[in-house]
Protein backbone atom coordinates (compact mmCIF):
# COMPACT_ATOMS: atom_id res chain seq x y z
CA UNK A 1 0.00 0.00 0.00
CA UNK A 2 2.66 2.38 1.06
CA UNK A 3 4.95 1.67 -1.88
CA UNK A 4 2.03 2.01 -4.24
CA UNK A 5 1.21 5.41 -2.82
CA UNK A 6 4.80 6.49 -3.03
CA UNK A 7 4.93 5.24 -6.58
CA UNK A 8 1.87 7.12 -7.68
CA UNK A 9 3.11 10.13 -5.80
CA UNK A 10 6.40 10.19 -7.65
CA UNK A 11 4.53 9.42 -10.89
CA UNK A 12 2.41 12.47 -10.30
CA UNK A 13 5.49 14.56 -9.71
CA UNK A 14 6.96 13.41 -12.98
CA UNK A 15 3.79 14.29 -14.82
CA UNK A 16 3.70 17.68 -13.14
CA UNK A 17 7.36 18.24 -13.94
CA UNK A 18 6.93 17.39 -17.60
CA UNK A 19 3.87 19.61 -17.78
CA UNK A 20 5.77 22.51 -16.26
CA UNK A 21 8.63 21.94 -18.67
CA UNK A 22 6.21 21.90 -21.61
CA UNK A 23 4.54 25.12 -20.45
CA UNK A 24 7.93 26.74 -19.97
CA UNK A 25 8.88 25.77 -23.50
CA UNK A 26 5.75 27.36 -24.93
CA UNK A 27 6.18 30.48 -22.79
CA UNK A 28 9.70 30.90 -24.17
CA UNK A 29 8.45 30.29 -27.71
CA UNK A 30 5.72 32.94 -27.38
CA UNK A 31 7.45 35.53 -25.24
CA UNK A 32 10.99 35.58 -26.63
CA UNK A 33 10.21 37.42 -29.90
CA UNK A 34 8.01 39.92 -28.04
CA UNK A 35 10.46 40.64 -25.24
CA UNK A 36 13.36 40.85 -27.69
CA UNK A 37 11.36 43.38 -29.72
CA UNK A 38 10.65 45.64 -26.75
CA UNK A 39 14.23 45.44 -25.46
CA UNK A 40 15.70 45.75 -28.95
CA UNK A 41 14.12 49.19 -29.16
CA UNK A 42 16.31 50.26 -26.24
CA UNK A 43 19.58 49.17 -27.82
CA UNK A 44 21.99 50.71 -30.27
CA UNK A 45 22.30 48.96 -33.59
CA UNK A 46 25.75 47.68 -32.66
CA UNK A 47 24.54 46.21 -29.41
CA UNK A 48 21.52 44.66 -31.05
CA UNK A 49 23.89 42.68 -33.22
CA UNK A 50 26.03 41.36 -30.40
CA UNK A 51 23.36 41.07 -27.72
CA UNK A 52 19.89 40.59 -29.21
CA UNK A 53 18.42 38.63 -26.28
CA UNK A 54 19.67 40.26 -23.11
CA UNK A 55 18.95 43.51 -21.30
CA UNK A 56 20.59 46.52 -22.94
CA UNK A 57 23.96 47.48 -21.45
CA UNK A 58 23.23 51.07 -22.31
CA UNK A 59 19.58 52.05 -22.40
CA UNK A 60 19.02 54.14 -25.52
CA UNK A 61 15.90 56.00 -24.46
CA UNK A 62 16.24 58.29 -27.44
CA UNK A 63 15.04 55.58 -29.87
CA UNK A 64 11.64 55.62 -28.23
CA UNK A 65 11.65 59.30 -27.35
CA UNK A 66 12.36 60.39 -30.92
CA UNK A 67 9.43 58.39 -32.22
CA UNK A 68 7.12 59.59 -29.46
CA UNK A 69 8.08 63.17 -30.26
CA UNK A 70 7.61 62.75 -33.98
CA UNK A 71 4.49 63.93 -35.75
CA UNK A 72 4.52 60.84 -37.87
CA UNK A 73 3.74 58.41 -35.06
CA UNK A 74 0.80 60.41 -33.75
CA UNK A 75 -0.53 61.00 -37.25
CA UNK A 76 -0.63 57.25 -37.85
CA UNK A 77 -2.37 56.56 -34.56
CA UNK A 78 -4.84 59.35 -35.24
CA UNK A 79 -5.68 57.98 -38.68
CA UNK A 80 -6.15 54.48 -37.29
CA UNK A 81 -8.23 55.83 -34.44
CA UNK A 82 -10.54 57.76 -36.80
CA UNK A 83 -11.00 54.79 -39.14
CA UNK A 84 -11.57 52.25 -36.35
CA UNK A 85 -13.85 54.44 -34.26
CA UNK A 86 -16.15 55.26 -37.16
CA UNK A 87 -16.12 51.64 -38.30
CA UNK A 88 -17.23 50.56 -34.83
CA UNK A 89 -19.93 53.23 -34.47
CA UNK A 90 -21.41 52.62 -37.91
CA UNK A 91 -21.27 48.85 -37.45
CA UNK A 92 -23.00 49.01 -34.09
CA UNK A 93 -25.75 51.32 -35.32
CA UNK A 94 -26.58 49.55 -38.57
CA UNK A 95 -26.08 46.01 -37.24
CA UNK A 96 -28.12 46.49 -34.08
CA UNK A 97 -31.02 48.04 -36.00
CA UNK A 98 -31.06 45.19 -38.50
CA UNK A 99 -30.63 42.60 -35.74
CA UNK A 100 -33.58 44.13 -33.88
CA UNK A 101 -35.81 43.64 -36.91
CA UNK A 102 -34.57 40.09 -37.43
CA UNK A 103 -35.15 39.27 -33.79
CA UNK A 104 -38.54 40.87 -33.13
CA UNK A 105 -40.48 41.61 -36.29
CA UNK A 106 -41.83 38.82 -38.42
CA UNK A 107 -42.36 39.70 -42.06
CA UNK A 108 -42.42 37.98 -45.40
CA UNK A 109 -38.90 37.03 -46.54
CA UNK A 110 -37.26 37.42 -43.15
CA UNK A 111 -35.41 34.12 -43.13
CA UNK A 112 -34.39 34.66 -46.75
CA UNK A 113 -32.89 38.04 -45.90
CA UNK A 114 -31.13 36.58 -42.89
CA UNK A 115 -29.59 33.88 -45.08
CA UNK A 116 -28.56 36.60 -47.51
CA UNK A 117 -26.68 38.38 -44.71
CA UNK A 118 -25.16 35.14 -43.45
CA UNK A 119 -23.50 34.76 -46.86
CA UNK A 120 -21.11 37.45 -45.71
CA UNK A 121 -19.47 34.95 -43.37
CA UNK A 122 -18.49 32.67 -46.21
CA UNK A 123 -15.77 34.60 -47.98
CA UNK A 124 -13.09 37.20 -47.15
CA UNK A 125 -13.01 40.76 -48.48
CA UNK A 126 -9.96 39.83 -50.53
CA UNK A 127 -11.99 37.80 -53.04
CA UNK A 128 -13.61 40.89 -54.54
CA UNK A 129 -10.96 43.45 -53.72
CA UNK A 130 -10.58 44.68 -57.32
CA UNK A 131 -14.28 45.35 -57.99
CA UNK A 132 -14.42 46.85 -54.50
CA UNK A 133 -11.60 49.18 -55.44
CA UNK A 134 -13.38 50.20 -58.64
CA UNK A 135 -16.63 50.75 -56.74
CA UNK A 136 -14.96 52.93 -54.12
CA UNK A 137 -13.18 54.84 -56.89
CA UNK A 138 -16.40 55.41 -58.81
CA UNK A 139 -18.05 56.67 -55.63
CA UNK A 140 -15.20 59.16 -55.34
CA UNK A 141 -14.10 57.78 -51.97
CA UNK A 142 -10.54 56.77 -52.85
CA UNK A 143 -8.01 58.39 -50.56
CA UNK A 144 -10.77 59.17 -48.11
CA UNK A 145 -11.32 57.57 -44.70
CA UNK A 146 -14.82 56.57 -45.81
CA UNK A 147 -13.39 54.45 -48.60
CA UNK A 148 -11.92 52.23 -45.90
CA UNK A 149 -14.64 52.61 -43.30
CA UNK A 150 -17.66 51.67 -45.41
CA UNK A 151 -16.24 48.39 -46.80
CA UNK A 152 -15.03 47.46 -43.32
CA UNK A 153 -18.48 48.09 -41.87
CA UNK A 154 -20.07 46.08 -44.66
CA UNK A 155 -17.80 43.13 -44.04
CA UNK A 156 -18.31 43.13 -40.28
CA UNK A 157 -22.11 43.29 -40.59
CA UNK A 158 -22.77 39.57 -41.04
CA UNK A 159 -21.07 38.42 -37.85
CA UNK A 160 -22.31 41.43 -35.87
CA UNK A 161 -25.93 40.99 -36.89
CA UNK A 162 -25.90 37.29 -36.02
CA UNK A 163 -24.36 37.88 -32.59
CA UNK A 164 -26.68 40.78 -31.76
CA UNK A 165 -29.77 39.00 -33.01
CA UNK A 166 -29.08 35.99 -30.82
CA UNK A 167 -28.78 38.24 -27.80
CA UNK A 168 -31.88 40.31 -28.64
CA UNK A 169 -33.94 37.16 -29.05
CA UNK A 170 -33.17 36.14 -25.51
CA UNK A 171 -34.64 39.32 -24.08
CA UNK A 172 -38.16 38.51 -22.82
CA UNK A 173 -40.72 38.88 -25.61
CA UNK A 174 -43.40 39.97 -23.11
CA UNK A 175 -41.48 43.18 -22.57
CA UNK A 176 -41.98 44.18 -26.19
CA UNK A 177 -45.62 43.06 -26.26
CA UNK A 178 -46.42 45.09 -23.17
CA UNK A 179 -44.59 48.15 -24.41
CA UNK A 180 -46.37 48.05 -27.77
CA UNK A 181 -49.77 47.69 -26.14
CA UNK A 182 -48.95 50.72 -24.02
CA UNK A 183 -48.31 52.67 -27.18
CA UNK A 184 -44.52 52.65 -27.18
CA UNK A 185 -43.09 52.71 -30.69
CA UNK A 186 -40.62 50.14 -31.97
CA UNK A 187 -38.03 52.84 -32.22
CA UNK A 188 -38.44 53.96 -28.63
CA UNK A 189 -38.42 50.37 -27.42
CA UNK A 190 -35.21 49.76 -29.34
CA UNK A 191 -33.68 52.96 -28.08
CA UNK A 192 -34.76 52.85 -24.44
CA UNK A 193 -35.11 49.12 -23.68
CA UNK A 194 -33.18 46.89 -26.09
CA UNK A 195 -29.97 48.90 -26.34
CA UNK A 196 -29.51 49.58 -22.61
CA UNK A 197 -30.15 45.91 -21.83
CA UNK A 198 -27.66 44.83 -24.48
CA UNK A 199 -24.57 46.64 -23.26
CA UNK A 200 -22.48 43.46 -22.81
CA UNK A 201 -23.03 42.20 -26.35
CA UNK A 202 -22.61 45.69 -27.81
CA UNK A 203 -19.29 45.94 -25.99
CA UNK A 204 -18.24 42.55 -27.31
CA UNK A 205 -19.22 43.26 -30.91
CA UNK A 206 -17.68 46.73 -30.68
CA UNK A 207 -14.38 45.41 -29.36
CA UNK A 208 -14.01 42.69 -31.97
CA UNK A 209 -14.88 45.11 -34.77
CA UNK A 210 -12.37 47.57 -33.38
CA UNK A 211 -9.56 45.03 -33.20
CA UNK A 212 -10.21 43.86 -36.76
CA UNK A 213 -10.34 47.40 -38.09
CA UNK A 214 -7.32 48.54 -36.07
CA UNK A 215 -5.19 45.71 -37.46
CA UNK A 216 -6.54 45.75 -41.03
CA UNK A 217 -4.08 46.10 -43.86
CA UNK A 218 -5.46 44.99 -47.22
CA UNK A 219 -8.43 47.37 -47.57
CA UNK A 220 -6.50 50.52 -46.54
CA UNK A 221 -3.59 49.41 -48.73
CA UNK A 222 -5.83 49.29 -51.77
CA UNK A 223 -8.00 52.34 -51.02
CA UNK A 224 -5.55 54.92 -49.64
CA UNK A 225 -2.86 56.65 -51.59
CA UNK A 226 -1.40 59.40 -49.48
CA UNK A 227 0.41 59.02 -46.20
CA UNK A 228 -1.79 61.66 -44.63
CA UNK A 229 -4.49 59.02 -44.35
CA UNK A 230 -2.47 55.87 -43.73
CA UNK A 231 -3.39 53.83 -40.67
CA UNK A 232 -0.53 52.46 -38.61
CA UNK A 233 -0.07 49.02 -40.26
CA UNK A 234 0.68 50.80 -43.54
CA UNK A 235 2.77 53.42 -41.82
CA UNK A 236 4.92 50.83 -40.13
CA UNK A 237 5.57 49.03 -43.43
CA UNK A 238 6.74 52.29 -44.96
CA UNK A 239 8.86 53.06 -41.91
CA UNK A 240 10.50 49.65 -42.26
CA UNK A 241 11.14 50.36 -45.92
CA UNK A 242 12.90 53.62 -45.08
CA UNK A 243 15.00 52.34 -42.20
CA UNK A 244 15.52 48.89 -43.69
CA UNK A 245 18.62 47.86 -41.75
CA UNK A 246 18.22 50.00 -38.66
CA UNK A 247 16.44 47.34 -36.71
CA UNK A 248 16.73 49.10 -33.35
CA UNK A 249 14.52 51.93 -34.64
CA UNK A 250 12.09 49.58 -36.36
CA UNK A 251 11.73 47.52 -33.19
CA UNK A 252 11.04 50.63 -31.14
CA UNK A 253 8.46 51.70 -33.70
CA UNK A 254 6.80 48.28 -33.67
CA UNK A 255 6.65 48.31 -29.88
CA UNK A 256 5.05 51.75 -29.79
CA UNK A 257 2.48 50.89 -32.42
CA UNK A 258 1.55 47.69 -30.60
CA UNK A 259 1.17 49.53 -27.32
CA UNK A 260 -2.45 50.63 -27.89
CA UNK A 261 -3.48 47.06 -28.79
CA UNK A 262 -1.87 45.69 -25.67
CA UNK A 263 -3.43 48.34 -23.45
CA UNK A 264 -6.83 47.63 -24.96
CA UNK A 265 -6.25 43.92 -24.46
CA UNK A 266 -5.46 44.38 -20.77
CA UNK A 267 -8.56 46.48 -20.19
CA UNK A 268 -11.04 44.67 -22.41
CA UNK A 269 -9.68 41.13 -22.14
CA UNK A 270 -13.06 39.64 -21.38
CA UNK A 271 -14.76 41.22 -24.37
CA UNK A 272 -11.90 40.47 -26.72
CA UNK A 273 -11.73 36.79 -25.85
CA UNK A 274 -15.52 36.48 -25.86
CA UNK A 275 -15.84 38.36 -29.13
CA UNK A 276 -13.08 36.70 -31.05
CA UNK A 277 -14.06 33.20 -30.03
CA UNK A 278 -17.80 33.83 -30.28
CA UNK A 279 -17.95 32.72 -33.89
CA UNK A 280 -17.52 29.38 -32.17
CA UNK A 281 -21.04 29.36 -30.85
CA UNK A 282 -23.43 28.90 -33.70
CA UNK A 283 -25.97 31.67 -34.21
CA UNK B 1 -46.60 41.61 -46.45
CA UNK B 2 -47.01 41.69 -42.70
CA UNK B 3 -48.11 38.48 -41.13
CA UNK B 4 -49.99 39.65 -38.07
CA UNK B 5 -52.83 42.12 -37.98
CA UNK B 6 -52.52 44.11 -34.83
CA UNK B 7 -53.05 47.78 -34.08
CA UNK B 8 -49.31 48.41 -34.22
CA UNK B 9 -48.91 47.19 -37.81
CA UNK B 10 -48.14 50.66 -39.07
CA UNK B 11 -45.41 51.02 -36.48
CA UNK B 12 -44.03 47.71 -37.57
CA UNK B 13 -43.80 48.82 -41.18
CA UNK B 14 -42.09 52.04 -40.17
CA UNK B 15 -39.59 50.10 -38.08
CA UNK B 16 -38.89 47.78 -40.99
CA UNK B 17 -38.36 50.60 -43.42
CA UNK B 18 -36.23 52.54 -40.96
CA UNK B 19 -34.06 49.80 -39.48
CA UNK B 20 -33.29 47.37 -42.25
CA UNK B 21 -32.17 49.45 -45.26
CA UNK B 22 -28.87 50.87 -43.92
CA UNK B 23 -27.37 47.46 -43.22
CA UNK B 24 -28.83 45.87 -46.34
CA UNK B 25 -27.64 48.70 -48.52
CA UNK B 26 -24.07 48.66 -47.20
CA UNK B 27 -23.91 44.89 -47.36
CA UNK B 28 -25.25 44.71 -50.89
CA UNK B 29 -23.13 47.55 -52.18
CA UNK B 30 -19.76 46.50 -50.72
CA UNK B 31 -20.01 42.75 -50.18
CA UNK B 32 -22.47 41.17 -52.61
CA UNK B 33 -22.19 43.38 -55.67
CA UNK B 34 -18.38 43.24 -55.89
CA UNK B 35 -18.54 39.44 -56.03
CA UNK B 36 -21.00 39.60 -58.91
CA UNK B 37 -18.88 42.24 -60.62
CA UNK B 38 -15.79 40.09 -60.16
CA UNK B 39 -17.52 37.35 -62.13
CA UNK B 40 -18.36 39.88 -64.86
CA UNK B 41 -14.93 41.58 -64.99
CA UNK B 42 -13.17 38.21 -65.09
CA UNK B 43 -14.30 37.83 -68.70
CA UNK B 44 -12.41 40.93 -69.81
CA UNK B 45 -8.88 42.03 -70.42
CA UNK B 46 -9.16 45.33 -68.58
CA UNK B 47 -6.81 47.72 -66.80
CA UNK B 48 -9.58 49.36 -64.76
CA UNK B 49 -9.90 52.58 -66.72
CA UNK B 50 -12.95 53.45 -68.77
CA UNK B 51 -15.36 50.61 -69.25
CA UNK B 52 -14.37 46.99 -69.84
CA UNK B 53 -14.62 46.32 -73.60
CA UNK B 54 -12.12 43.66 -74.50
CA UNK B 55 -14.11 40.46 -73.87
CA UNK B 56 -11.87 37.39 -73.77
CA UNK B 57 -14.24 34.80 -72.33
CA UNK B 58 -12.59 32.18 -70.14
CA UNK B 59 -9.04 33.19 -71.03
CA UNK B 60 -8.31 34.81 -67.67
CA UNK B 61 -9.12 31.56 -65.90
CA UNK B 62 -6.81 29.71 -68.26
CA UNK B 63 -4.06 32.25 -67.53
CA UNK B 64 -4.55 31.74 -63.80
CA UNK B 65 -4.40 27.97 -63.97
CA UNK B 66 -1.41 28.08 -66.33
CA UNK B 67 0.45 30.36 -63.94
CA UNK B 68 3.10 28.45 -62.02
CA UNK B 69 3.01 30.90 -59.13
CA UNK B 70 -0.70 30.25 -58.66
CA UNK B 71 -0.01 26.52 -58.40
CA UNK B 72 2.60 27.22 -55.75
CA UNK B 73 0.22 29.54 -53.92
CA UNK B 74 -2.49 26.89 -53.92
CA UNK B 75 -0.05 24.31 -52.60
CA UNK B 76 1.10 26.74 -49.92
CA UNK B 77 -2.49 27.21 -48.79
CA UNK B 78 -2.83 23.43 -48.50
CA UNK B 79 0.47 23.23 -46.64
CA UNK B 80 -0.76 25.81 -44.14
CA UNK B 81 -3.87 23.71 -43.55
CA UNK B 82 -1.81 20.54 -43.05
CA UNK B 83 0.48 22.25 -40.54
CA UNK B 84 -2.54 23.72 -38.75
CA UNK B 85 -3.95 20.23 -38.34
CA UNK B 86 -0.74 18.40 -37.48
CA UNK B 87 1.08 20.96 -35.36
CA UNK B 88 -1.19 23.77 -34.29
CA UNK B 89 -4.23 21.74 -33.27
CA UNK B 90 -2.39 19.24 -31.03
CA UNK B 91 -0.43 22.10 -29.47
CA UNK B 92 -3.61 24.08 -28.78
CA UNK B 93 -5.51 21.07 -27.47
CA UNK B 94 -2.75 19.88 -25.15
CA UNK B 95 -2.29 23.36 -23.71
CA UNK B 96 -6.03 23.74 -23.24
CA UNK B 97 -6.16 20.46 -21.30
CA UNK B 98 -3.50 21.78 -18.95
CA UNK B 99 -4.75 25.36 -18.68
CA UNK B 100 -8.51 24.76 -18.50
CA UNK B 101 -8.15 23.92 -14.83
CA UNK B 102 -7.81 26.73 -12.36
CA UNK B 103 -4.37 26.93 -10.82
CA UNK B 104 -2.15 29.78 -9.92
CA UNK B 105 -0.92 31.41 -13.09
CA UNK B 106 -3.27 29.55 -15.44
CA UNK B 107 -5.16 32.69 -16.40
CA UNK B 108 -1.95 34.59 -17.01
CA UNK B 109 -0.58 31.85 -19.22
CA UNK B 110 -3.83 31.72 -21.17
CA UNK B 111 -3.63 35.45 -21.79
CA UNK B 112 0.02 35.27 -22.79
CA UNK B 113 -0.68 32.50 -25.30
CA UNK B 114 -3.71 34.33 -26.66
CA UNK B 115 -1.86 37.62 -27.06
CA UNK B 116 -0.17 36.90 -30.43
CA UNK B 117 -3.63 36.42 -31.90
CA UNK B 118 -4.69 40.01 -31.31
CA UNK B 119 -1.45 41.59 -32.52
CA UNK B 120 -1.70 42.87 -36.09
CA UNK B 121 -0.38 40.45 -38.70
CA UNK B 122 1.75 43.25 -40.13
CA UNK B 123 3.50 43.85 -36.80
CA UNK B 124 3.88 40.11 -36.23
CA UNK B 125 5.42 39.70 -39.65
CA UNK B 126 7.89 42.53 -39.00
CA UNK B 127 8.84 41.09 -35.61
CA UNK B 128 9.62 37.78 -37.24
CA UNK B 129 11.50 39.29 -40.11
CA UNK B 130 13.74 40.60 -37.33
CA UNK B 131 13.85 37.15 -35.67
CA UNK B 132 14.91 35.57 -38.98
CA UNK B 133 17.26 38.37 -40.06
CA UNK B 134 20.57 36.80 -41.02
CA UNK B 135 22.64 39.62 -39.51
CA UNK B 136 20.77 41.06 -36.54
CA UNK B 137 18.13 38.46 -35.85
CA UNK B 138 17.59 36.18 -32.89
CA UNK B 139 18.15 33.11 -35.01
CA UNK B 140 21.45 34.50 -36.27
CA UNK B 141 22.57 35.05 -32.67
CA UNK B 142 21.83 31.45 -31.80
CA UNK B 143 23.79 30.24 -34.80
CA UNK B 144 26.70 32.49 -33.86
CA UNK B 145 26.75 30.93 -30.40
CA UNK B 146 27.66 27.69 -32.10
CA UNK B 147 30.10 29.38 -34.41
CA UNK B 148 27.92 28.80 -37.47
CA UNK B 149 26.82 31.15 -40.22
CA UNK B 150 23.09 31.91 -39.93
CA UNK B 151 20.91 31.01 -42.91
CA UNK B 152 18.76 33.72 -44.44
CA UNK B 153 15.58 31.71 -44.09
CA UNK B 154 13.30 34.22 -45.77
CA UNK B 155 15.67 34.80 -48.66
CA UNK B 156 15.73 31.24 -49.94
CA UNK B 157 12.86 29.67 -51.89
CA UNK B 158 13.48 26.38 -50.06
CA UNK B 159 12.97 27.75 -46.57
CA UNK B 160 10.75 30.82 -46.96
CA UNK B 161 7.50 28.90 -46.54
CA UNK B 162 8.85 26.92 -43.60
CA UNK B 163 9.71 30.16 -41.82
CA UNK B 164 6.21 31.51 -42.49
CA UNK B 165 4.58 28.34 -41.18
CA UNK B 166 6.33 28.77 -37.84
CA UNK B 167 4.99 32.32 -37.58
CA UNK B 168 1.50 31.06 -38.36
CA UNK B 169 1.64 28.54 -35.53
CA UNK B 170 3.05 31.22 -33.19
CA UNK B 171 0.27 33.62 -34.03
CA UNK B 172 -2.80 31.43 -34.15
CA UNK B 173 -2.44 28.50 -31.72
CA UNK B 174 -3.66 30.65 -28.82
CA UNK B 175 -6.98 31.30 -30.54
CA UNK B 176 -7.61 27.58 -30.97
CA UNK B 177 -6.49 26.97 -27.40
CA UNK B 178 -9.11 29.45 -26.19
CA UNK B 179 -11.81 27.64 -28.19
CA UNK B 180 -10.86 24.39 -26.48
CA UNK B 181 -10.67 25.97 -23.03
CA UNK B 182 -14.15 27.42 -23.44
CA UNK B 183 -15.45 24.00 -24.47
CA UNK B 184 -13.66 22.20 -21.64
CA UNK B 185 -15.03 24.60 -19.06
CA UNK B 186 -18.55 24.12 -20.35
CA UNK B 187 -18.19 20.37 -20.16
CA UNK B 188 -20.26 18.23 -17.80
CA UNK B 189 -17.79 17.25 -15.11
CA UNK B 190 -19.99 14.44 -13.78
CA UNK B 191 -19.09 12.23 -16.72
CA UNK B 192 -15.40 12.53 -16.02
CA UNK B 193 -16.03 12.01 -12.32
CA UNK B 194 -18.14 8.92 -12.98
CA UNK B 195 -15.45 7.42 -15.18
CA UNK B 196 -12.85 8.08 -12.52
CA UNK B 197 -14.99 6.36 -9.91
CA UNK B 198 -15.31 3.41 -12.27
CA UNK B 199 -11.54 3.13 -12.30
CA UNK B 200 -10.66 4.69 -15.64
CA UNK B 201 -7.16 6.15 -15.75
CA UNK B 202 -6.31 9.60 -17.07
CA UNK B 203 -5.45 8.42 -20.55
CA UNK B 204 -8.69 6.43 -20.83
CA UNK B 205 -10.71 9.40 -19.63
CA UNK B 206 -9.01 11.64 -22.17
CA UNK B 207 -9.33 9.17 -25.01
CA UNK B 208 -12.87 7.94 -24.42
CA UNK B 209 -14.65 10.83 -22.72
CA UNK B 210 -13.00 14.21 -23.15
CA UNK B 211 -11.93 13.94 -26.79
CA UNK B 212 -15.32 12.63 -27.98
CA UNK B 213 -17.04 15.43 -26.08
CA UNK B 214 -14.69 17.92 -27.73
CA UNK B 215 -15.46 16.69 -31.23
CA UNK B 216 -17.70 19.61 -32.22
CA UNK B 217 -15.02 22.05 -31.04
CA UNK B 218 -12.28 20.17 -32.88
CA UNK B 219 -14.34 20.34 -36.07
CA UNK B 220 -14.88 24.03 -35.52
CA UNK B 221 -11.20 24.61 -34.89
CA UNK B 222 -10.37 22.82 -38.15
CA UNK B 223 -12.97 24.94 -39.92
CA UNK B 224 -11.36 28.15 -38.66
CA UNK B 225 -7.88 26.93 -39.55
CA UNK B 226 -8.94 26.27 -43.15
CA UNK B 227 -10.87 29.52 -43.52
CA UNK B 228 -7.90 31.38 -42.02
CA UNK B 229 -5.50 29.76 -44.45
CA UNK B 230 -7.68 30.73 -47.42
CA UNK B 231 -7.55 34.42 -46.48
CA UNK B 232 -3.98 34.67 -45.28
CA UNK B 233 -2.34 37.79 -46.70
CA UNK B 234 -1.20 40.37 -44.17
CA UNK B 235 1.42 38.10 -42.64
CA UNK B 236 3.01 37.33 -46.00
CA UNK B 237 3.66 40.95 -46.94
CA UNK B 238 6.16 41.99 -44.25
CA UNK B 239 7.90 38.61 -44.29
CA UNK B 240 8.46 37.83 -47.97
CA UNK B 241 5.90 39.58 -50.18
CA UNK B 242 5.42 36.15 -51.69
CA UNK B 243 9.03 35.76 -52.73
CA UNK B 244 11.73 34.81 -53.31
CA UNK B 245 10.89 33.55 -56.80
CA UNK B 246 7.17 33.45 -55.87
CA UNK B 247 7.86 30.60 -53.45
CA UNK B 248 5.74 31.82 -50.56
CA UNK B 249 2.57 33.24 -52.08
CA UNK B 250 -0.84 32.38 -50.75
CA UNK B 251 -3.79 32.72 -53.11
CA UNK B 252 -4.65 36.16 -51.71
CA UNK B 253 -1.08 37.46 -51.91
CA UNK B 254 -0.97 36.08 -55.45
CA UNK B 255 -4.14 38.02 -56.22
CA UNK B 256 -2.67 41.19 -54.76
CA UNK B 257 0.66 40.83 -56.48
CA UNK B 258 -0.51 39.82 -59.95
CA UNK B 259 -3.94 41.45 -60.01
CA UNK B 260 -4.03 44.57 -57.86
CA UNK B 261 -0.43 45.76 -58.16
CA UNK B 262 -0.49 45.46 -61.95
CA UNK B 263 -4.09 46.63 -62.23
CA UNK B 264 -5.03 43.57 -64.25
CA UNK B 265 -8.65 43.74 -63.20
CA UNK B 266 -9.86 40.81 -65.28
CA UNK B 267 -7.09 38.50 -64.20
CA UNK B 268 -7.33 39.49 -60.54
CA UNK B 269 -11.10 39.11 -60.60
CA UNK B 270 -10.71 35.60 -62.00
CA UNK B 271 -8.43 34.73 -59.07
CA UNK B 272 -11.02 36.25 -56.73
CA UNK B 273 -13.81 34.20 -58.27
CA UNK B 274 -11.75 31.02 -57.94
CA UNK B 275 -11.06 31.85 -54.31
CA UNK B 276 -14.74 32.61 -53.76
CA UNK B 277 -15.81 29.29 -55.27
CA UNK B 278 -13.29 27.45 -53.10
CA UNK B 279 -14.45 29.24 -49.93
CA UNK B 280 -18.15 28.72 -50.56
CA UNK B 281 -17.82 25.12 -51.72
CA UNK B 282 -15.68 24.36 -48.71
CA UNK B 283 -18.00 26.06 -46.23
CA UNK B 284 -21.10 24.29 -47.53
CA UNK B 285 -19.58 20.84 -47.86
CA UNK B 286 -17.87 21.07 -44.49
CA UNK B 287 -21.14 22.05 -42.84
CA UNK B 288 -22.98 19.30 -44.67
CA UNK B 289 -20.53 16.46 -44.12
CA UNK B 290 -18.89 17.21 -40.82
CA UNK B 291 -21.11 19.46 -38.77
CA UNK B 292 -24.59 18.17 -39.46
CA UNK B 293 -24.79 15.86 -36.43
CA UNK B 294 -24.19 18.68 -33.98
CA UNK B 295 -26.67 21.45 -33.67
Image: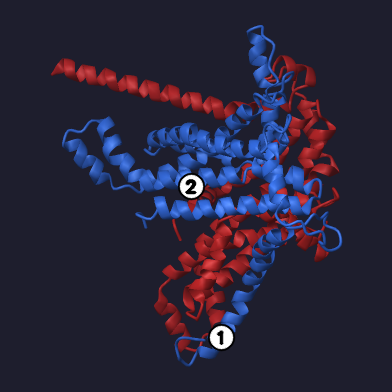
Chain colours: A red, B blue
Q: Nearer the viewer, mark 1 or mark 2?
A: 2
Count of numbered marks:
2
Badge 1 or badge 2: first in the primary sequence: 1
> Quick check: can you spot residue B34?
yes
Circle 1 marks a residue in which chain? Answer: B
Q: Is residue B6 left or right of residue A264?
A: left
Give the vertical position of A78 relative to B133 (above or below): below
Tell me where residue B138 appears, x and y as whole percent.
Answer: 66, 21
What is the quadrant of residue B40 in the picture?
bottom right
Left/right placement of residue A13 relative to residue B57 reads left
The quarter of the rendered structure image containing the C terminus of chain B is bottom left
The kind of secondary structure element at disc 1 is helix
Name, please, the residue furthest toward the top: B147
Query: What's the residue at 76%, 44% (across, down)?
Result: B258
- Residue on which the image places disc 2: B223
Residue matched to label 1 = B13
The image shows residue B243, relative to residue A175, as above or below, that is: above
Q: Secondary structure at mark 2?
A: helix
Amino acid sequence: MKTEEAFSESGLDWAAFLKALYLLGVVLFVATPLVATVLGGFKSLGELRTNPFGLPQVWEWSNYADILLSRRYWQLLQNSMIISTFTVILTLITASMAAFVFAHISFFGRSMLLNYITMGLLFPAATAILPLFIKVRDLGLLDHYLGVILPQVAFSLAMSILLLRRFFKELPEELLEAALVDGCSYFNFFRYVTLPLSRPILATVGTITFVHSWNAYLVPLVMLNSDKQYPWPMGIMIYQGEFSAEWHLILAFITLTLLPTIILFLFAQKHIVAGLTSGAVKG
Amino acid sequence: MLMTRKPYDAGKLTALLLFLPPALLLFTLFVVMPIGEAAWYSGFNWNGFGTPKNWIGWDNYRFVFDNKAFGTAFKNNLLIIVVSLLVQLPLALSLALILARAFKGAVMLRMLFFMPYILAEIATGLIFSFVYDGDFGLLAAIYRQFGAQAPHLLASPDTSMLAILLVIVWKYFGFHMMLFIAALQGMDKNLVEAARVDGANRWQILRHIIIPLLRPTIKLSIFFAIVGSLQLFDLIMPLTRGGPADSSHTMVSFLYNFGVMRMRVGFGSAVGVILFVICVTFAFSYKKWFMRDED
